[in-house]
Amino acid sequence: MSFQKKIVIQDKATLHKPRVCGGIAGLRPVNEEDLQVWDMYKEHLEKKIQDQFKVPKSHTLKPIQVATQVVAGMNYFFKVELPDKKYATARIYHVPWQNDTHGKADQVAVHAKLSGNPNEDLGHF
Protein backbone atom coordinates (compact mmCIF):
# COMPACT_ATOMS: atom_id res chain seq x y z
CA MET A 1 0.00 0.00 0.00
CA SER A 2 1.47 3.36 -0.96
CA PHE A 3 0.61 6.73 0.44
CA GLN A 4 0.88 9.93 -1.49
CA LYS A 5 1.22 13.31 0.10
CA LYS A 6 -0.82 16.04 -1.42
CA ILE A 7 0.56 19.53 -1.13
CA VAL A 8 -1.74 22.45 -1.73
CA ILE A 9 -0.20 25.83 -2.35
CA GLN A 10 -2.49 28.81 -2.30
CA ASP A 11 -1.47 32.27 -3.35
CA LYS A 12 -1.90 34.74 -0.48
CA ALA A 13 -3.82 37.09 -2.77
CA THR A 14 -6.65 34.55 -2.99
CA LEU A 15 -6.93 33.92 0.74
CA HIS A 16 -9.96 35.49 2.38
CA LYS A 17 -10.73 36.09 6.01
CA PRO A 18 -13.52 33.78 7.08
CA ARG A 19 -16.85 35.54 7.48
CA VAL A 20 -18.15 35.38 11.00
CA CYS A 21 -21.87 35.38 11.62
CA GLY A 22 -22.70 38.89 12.80
CA GLY A 23 -19.18 40.07 11.96
CA ILE A 24 -18.29 43.16 9.97
CA ALA A 25 -17.42 42.55 6.32
CA GLY A 26 -14.24 44.11 4.93
CA LEU A 27 -14.16 47.63 3.55
CA ARG A 28 -15.07 48.03 -0.11
CA PRO A 29 -15.83 50.90 -2.49
CA VAL A 30 -19.27 52.49 -2.10
CA ASN A 31 -21.84 51.38 -4.70
CA GLU A 32 -25.22 52.80 -5.79
CA GLU A 33 -27.19 50.82 -3.20
CA ASP A 34 -24.92 52.11 -0.42
CA LEU A 35 -25.36 55.68 -1.67
CA GLN A 36 -29.15 55.29 -1.55
CA VAL A 37 -28.88 54.40 2.14
CA TRP A 38 -26.39 57.26 2.72
CA ASP A 39 -28.78 59.71 1.06
CA MET A 40 -31.68 58.68 3.34
CA TYR A 41 -29.66 59.77 6.39
CA LYS A 42 -27.45 62.41 4.75
CA GLU A 43 -28.87 65.40 6.63
CA HIS A 44 -28.15 63.81 10.04
CA LEU A 45 -24.76 62.45 8.96
CA GLU A 46 -23.62 65.86 7.75
CA LYS A 47 -24.80 67.63 10.90
CA LYS A 48 -23.17 65.14 13.27
CA ILE A 49 -19.85 65.07 11.38
CA GLN A 50 -19.75 68.86 10.91
CA ASP A 51 -20.55 69.50 14.58
CA GLN A 52 -18.21 66.85 15.97
CA PHE A 53 -15.16 67.61 13.81
CA LYS A 54 -15.73 71.31 12.99
CA VAL A 55 -16.02 70.60 9.26
CA PRO A 56 -17.10 73.66 7.26
CA LYS A 57 -20.61 73.40 5.83
CA SER A 58 -19.12 74.31 2.45
CA HIS A 59 -17.25 70.98 2.37
CA THR A 60 -19.23 68.23 0.63
CA LEU A 61 -19.06 65.05 2.67
CA LYS A 62 -18.69 62.01 0.49
CA PRO A 63 -18.42 58.40 1.61
CA ILE A 64 -15.46 56.65 -0.03
CA GLN A 65 -15.66 53.17 1.47
CA VAL A 66 -18.17 51.07 3.34
CA ALA A 67 -18.35 47.89 5.36
CA THR A 68 -21.58 46.19 6.33
CA GLN A 69 -22.76 44.06 9.22
CA VAL A 70 -25.92 41.99 9.23
CA VAL A 71 -27.77 42.48 12.51
CA ALA A 72 -31.53 42.84 13.02
CA GLY A 73 -31.29 44.97 9.90
CA MET A 74 -27.98 46.22 8.48
CA ASN A 75 -25.19 48.36 9.89
CA TYR A 76 -23.38 50.42 7.28
CA PHE A 77 -19.97 51.71 8.35
CA PHE A 78 -19.00 54.52 6.00
CA LYS A 79 -15.51 56.03 5.75
CA VAL A 80 -15.93 59.74 4.98
CA GLU A 81 -13.07 61.93 3.77
CA LEU A 82 -12.72 65.26 5.54
CA PRO A 83 -10.91 68.37 4.23
CA ASP A 84 -7.59 67.66 6.02
CA LYS A 85 -7.18 64.13 4.57
CA LYS A 86 -8.53 62.64 7.77
CA TYR A 87 -11.35 60.13 7.73
CA ALA A 88 -14.43 59.93 9.90
CA THR A 89 -16.33 56.70 10.42
CA ALA A 90 -20.11 56.96 10.47
CA ARG A 91 -22.52 54.12 11.21
CA ILE A 92 -26.05 53.90 9.90
CA TYR A 93 -28.36 51.29 11.35
CA HIS A 94 -30.85 50.66 8.54
CA VAL A 95 -33.86 48.36 8.76
CA PRO A 96 -35.27 48.17 5.22
CA TRP A 97 -38.65 46.74 6.27
CA GLN A 98 -39.32 49.43 8.92
CA ASN A 99 -40.17 52.52 6.91
CA ASP A 100 -40.89 54.56 10.05
CA THR A 101 -37.17 54.45 11.01
CA HIS A 102 -35.81 55.56 7.63
CA GLY A 103 -33.87 58.81 7.78
CA LYS A 104 -34.10 59.19 11.57
CA ALA A 105 -31.24 60.84 13.48
CA ASP A 106 -31.12 58.10 16.12
CA GLN A 107 -30.14 55.58 13.42
CA VAL A 108 -26.85 57.44 12.87
CA ALA A 109 -23.66 57.44 14.98
CA VAL A 110 -20.25 58.96 14.34
CA HIS A 111 -17.07 57.56 15.88
CA ALA A 112 -15.36 60.01 18.23
CA LYS A 113 -11.89 59.62 16.67
CA LEU A 114 -10.59 60.43 13.22
CA SER A 115 -8.25 58.22 11.25
CA GLY A 116 -5.44 59.15 8.89
CA ASN A 117 -5.93 55.90 6.98
CA PRO A 118 -9.05 55.22 4.87
CA ASN A 119 -8.32 51.48 5.06
CA GLU A 120 -8.10 51.30 8.85
CA ASP A 121 -9.91 48.33 10.32
CA LEU A 122 -13.35 49.13 11.76
CA GLY A 123 -12.81 47.11 14.92
CA HIS A 124 -12.41 50.41 16.78
CA PHE A 125 -16.02 51.56 16.28
Image (cartoon, rainbow, N blue to C red):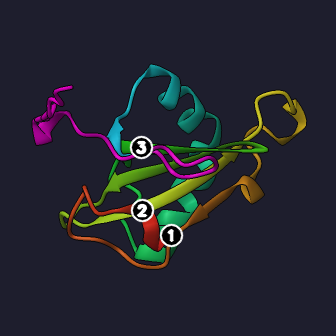
Other residues around mark 3 within 10 Å, as few (<14) / some (14–19) / many (≥20)? many
Tag 2 residue? 122
Judge by depth and name the residue closer to the eye, 75 or 86.
Answer: 75
Specify the quadrant that holds the N terminus.
top left
Relative side of 10 to 90, left or right: left
Q: Amino acid at mark 1?
A: Phe
For the residues labelled 3 and 1, say whether their Cβ atoms are less than 8 Å apart: no
Q: Secondary structure at mark 3?
A: strand
Asked where in the image residue 4 lies, by quadrant, the reply is: top left
| Three-letter amino acid code at the position of disc 3 | Val
Label 1: which secondary element: loop
User: Do the CB atoms of the residues marked 3 and 2 lie less than 8 Å apart?
Assistant: no
Residue at x-position 32% and y-position 53% = 59
Q: In percent of the image, x 13 and y 42: which residue is there? A: 12
Q: Position of residue 29 (x, y in %)?
A: 31, 34
Residue behind mark 3:
66
Q: Residue at x 83, y 42 (%)?
A: 101
Q: Amino acid at mark 2?
A: Leu
- Tell me the chief SS of the magenta region: loop
| Mark carried by residue 125 | 1
Residue 78 drawn at (x, y percent) = 45, 49
Discs 2, 1 touching: Cβ within 8 Å? yes
Q: CA distance from mark 3 to mark 2?
A: 10 Å
Q: What residue is rendered at 61% in x and 63% in y?
A: 109
- Asked if residue 24 is among those painted magenta in the image, a careful observer would answer yes
- Give how far apart the Cα atoms at labels 2 and 1 are: 6 Å
Nearer to us in this view, 2 or 67? 2
Dot 1: within a 10 Å radius of its alpha carbon, few (fewer than 14), some, or many (20 or more) residues?
A: few
Residue 12 visible at all: yes
